[in-house]
Amino acid sequence: MKLKSYQLPYVFVFLGVFSVFISSSKTLSRAAENIMNIDEIVPGMKGYGKTVFSGDRVEMFNVEVLGILRNWEAKSNMILIKMSGDPLEKSGIIAGMSGSPVYIDNRLIGAVAYGWSFAKEAIAGVTPINEMKSTLLNIPTQEKDVSLTSADWELPSFPQNGTEPGSQVTPLMSQELTQGSSGNMKLTPILAPLVVSGVSGEVLQKMQPLFNTYGLYPVQGGSYVSVGPLSGKGDSLSEKDKLVPGASVAAILVKGDLSAAVVGTVTYVEGDNVLAFGHPFLQTGTADLPMASAYVYAILTSQSNSVKMASPREIVGRIHQDRRAGIAGILGESSRMVPCRIEVEGSQSLVYDFEIIDNKLLTPSLVLMAAQSAVLSTERRLGEKSVNIKLSALIDGYEKPVVIENVFYELDPSWFPLNHIVQPFAMILNNQFQKVRVNRIDLKIKVLDARKTAYIEAIKVDKKQVKPGDTLQVDVRIKPFTGESFYQTVLMQIPEDTLPGSTLNVTACDATYGQALNMGRSAGKFLPTNFEQLLHYVENMERNNNLMVRVLLPKKGVTYKGEGFPSLPTSMLSIMSFSNQSGIGPLFDEVISRIPTAYVVSGNQSIPVSVK
């Protein structure tokens, strides 16, 4: 059939559309062929994996499939493989390999993610790539209105004697493995190296129980070095900083004068989306962490845990998902970080400026680590010290910063002083009342190489009998360490409504004893029922340098939902005392005076006074 001239353009259009359809079909087919489903995998298959053993060059290692562990966890399968090739013959599984892609017939099957510590051979568990994609790529990312050019770049408890009571995070690595016991071998996520710089080895040793709880393996390494931020998604990365399957990737936790980053391996890249690790980092679900390329200096081999010595190279995007199947990031986006400054004043004065991730679980721990390292870097490690610590945190929605301050004495370096400042800050971040967004953290530490302590020797009053409305003079005798005793005079006003014929108990005490009296006499006031009460409680915790004088009155009141009502009429007091509603507690009425001193005060003394 001969086509007429006016029909030719329609034929060409049809042929063009048909050719595009055929081309697209081939592309989709090739994309499907590049991934192998777990049902196609059988024991004995051989392939290869990709990772970085040195520098930034992606290298291959040999892989043999040993079997499929189906439903090893709820709705999760695992491919069991044996890896070989230099340097795996000597090192076994290497911390930092998490996420290394594995291929059979040039088709991706998943990411190296699990292993057994102390195993003689490099036998690993592979998270199937389809599980990673379905878990991490089908979740919408949080809307971000910033890019990498912007200026703005969920603790519980802290380690005490090697333990972490109160942690709400499920361990990713059994204690038997992380503490070096080979008696109990379990399949666990491969430890992720937490590469830290600017922090002493002694501090890392103290923090290790906490980091191991999160499946992290702290090691000292090089700091993050930026070669200039990107201006947006359209920018091109240098070849060294491209995140391709097998390349090293880092999740930045701290950057600046102090730095910390978790290193793993890229598994899969689709457009601007990057999948890595093959197992969770903290399993927080939605995340917000800077994502960077990384450079590997060397492999440190060990019978227990071989590890990649690496450093982050350049921030290239944002990690937005942290789930059971791995982590997901987007190239070209940025994460919010909190500016921090630590000032240490002592034999020398130093300032540390850095940025830290905004995460209620890790932020307090990382602040504690940075502060302890700063103190040890600027002060002597042994000997008597008096330490004044002041933490100021600017919280979104509040004009004035939250201030936590106290004075301590310690004989040897310990977590105690810093811990008692950072713990209340952790209470604020992890409060049950509202979400907290921290905009800035400042920590000032003043260290004096002297013992500035004193104890309460005795007290005396100017009269043993008082009338309602009188002023009672209390003289407290204080004995400084190696110094002469002196008297501190405190004037206490007796209320007009004090019951005649009653007996008043006058007590001079330190902060620890005073806090115990607070809990015994008005416990309901120290159980916050809203965020404002929590802030007031944290900012007004008893300070160790205060001399406290208290006059206990016979009149009682009640506490209701964290508020004290000391002067209720007798009828109302009776009604509320026998109320069938919760949240009501007893309150002992008292007059309290706090006098700041130049010492860390200890001890307590009491004397009775009668009312005419």
Image: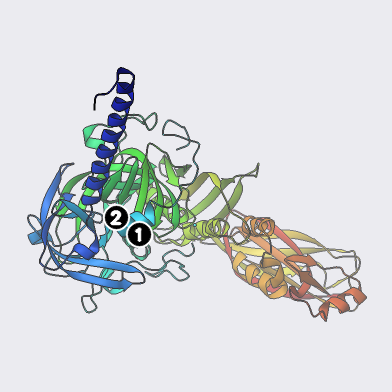
Residue type marked 1? Pro
Front residue of 123 and 488: 123
Among the 4 quarters of the image, the one containing residue 8 = top left
Name, please, the residue furthest toward the front: 1
The residue under label 1 is 280
| 141 in relation to 502, above or below | above
Q: Is residue 39 visible?
A: yes
Q: Is residue 449 visible?
A: no
Q: Secondary structure at mark 2?
A: loop
Tag on residue 47?
Answer: none
Is the C-beta separation of discs 2 and 1 under 8 Å?
Answer: yes
Among the 4 quarters of the image, the one containing residue 369 = bottom left
Front residue of 418 and 395: 395
Q: CA distance from mark 2 to mark 1?
A: 7 Å
Q: x%, y% of residue 437?
A: 56, 48
Q: Secondary structure at mark 1?
A: loop
Query: Which quadrant is home to the N terminus?
Result: top left
Is residue 569 rendered to the left or right of residue 122? right
Q: How is the image coloured?
A: rainbow
Q: x%, y% of residue 179?
A: 27, 70
Query: In the rendered picture of this protein, how many numbered marks are placed on residues?
Result: 2
Is residue 101 rendered to the left or right of residue 45? right
Front residue of 191 and 478: 191
Residue drawn at the location 23% of the way across and 53% of the way down: 35
Residue type marked 2? Phe
- The crowd level at tag 2 (other Cα within 10 Å; few <14, some 14-19, many 20+) is many
- The crowd level at tag 1 (other Cα within 10 Å; few <14, some 14-19, many 20+) is many
Q: x%, y% of residue 350?
A: 41, 40
Query: Which quadrant is home to the C terminus?
Result: bottom right
Tag on residue 277?
Answer: 2
